[in-house]
């Protein structure tokens, strides 16, 4: 987990901790400014590259559509070498 405030507020609001316990999830914090240690970040790098970089979307709906289309394509083509190469460049942990 990064330092996003809901992740840090388990003393005041126990919902995140309760969800983790109910779903057999172990929460692990990463240091501030170390998002490269968060294993999901490499997937956001590929999403940014394919759906957001160099674009000028006219609306939030258009941008959301591009993101949904990327995710749908990514899920259909799990072994795409280009996406894998971009993700691996960002993956260090």
Image (cartoon, rainbow, N blue to C red):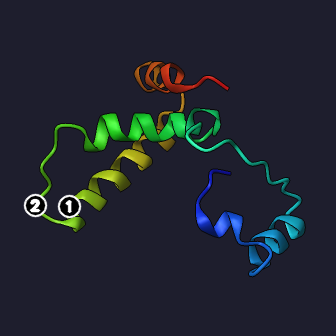
Q: Position of residue 87 (x, y in %)?
A: 49, 27
Seen from the viewer's position, the closer of residues 31 and 40 is 31
In-image side of 33 versus 66 (left or right): right
Residue in view at x 68 percent, y 51 percent: 1
Tag 1, which secondary structure? helix
Residue in view at x 59 percent, y 41 percent: 40
Which label is found at residue 53?
Answer: none
Which label is found at residue 58?
Answer: 2
Q: Crowdedness of circle 1 by 10 Å Cα count: few (<14), some, many (20+)?
A: few
Relative vertical location of residue 84 with respect to residue 18 in this rendering, above or below: above
Q: In the rendered image, which residue does mark 1 sit on?
A: 62
In-image side of 37 versus 25 (left or right): left
Q: Position of residue 69 (x, y in %)?
A: 34, 50
Relative vertical location of residue 14 with respect to residue 67 in this rendering, above or below: below
Q: Position of residue 8 (x, y in %)?
A: 70, 64
> Extreme front residue here?
32
> Extreme bottom residue here?
12
Q: Quadrant of residue 24?
A: bottom right
- CA gap between label 2 and label 1 equals 7 Å
Seen from the viewer's position, the closer of residues 31 and 89 is 31
Q: Quadrant of residue 41?
A: top right
Relative vertical location of residue 85 with respect to residue 2 in this rendering, above or below: above
Residue in view at x 37 percent, y 55 percent: 68
Tag 2, which secondary structure? loop
Circles 2 and 1, Cβ within 8 Å, touching? The answer is: yes
């Amino acid at each position: 987990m990064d330092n996003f405030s809901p992740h840090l507020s388990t003393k005041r609001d126990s919902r995140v901790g309760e969800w983790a316990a109910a779903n057999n999830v172990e929460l692990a914090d990463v240091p501030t400014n170390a998002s490269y240690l968060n294993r999901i970040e490499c997937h956001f790098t590929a999403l940014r590259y394919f759906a957001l970089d160099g674009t000028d979307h006219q609306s939030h709906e258009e941008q959301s559509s591009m993101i949904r289309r990327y995710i749908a394509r990514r899920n259909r083509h799990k072994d795409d070498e280009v996406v894998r190469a971009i993700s691996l460049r960002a993956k260090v942990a």
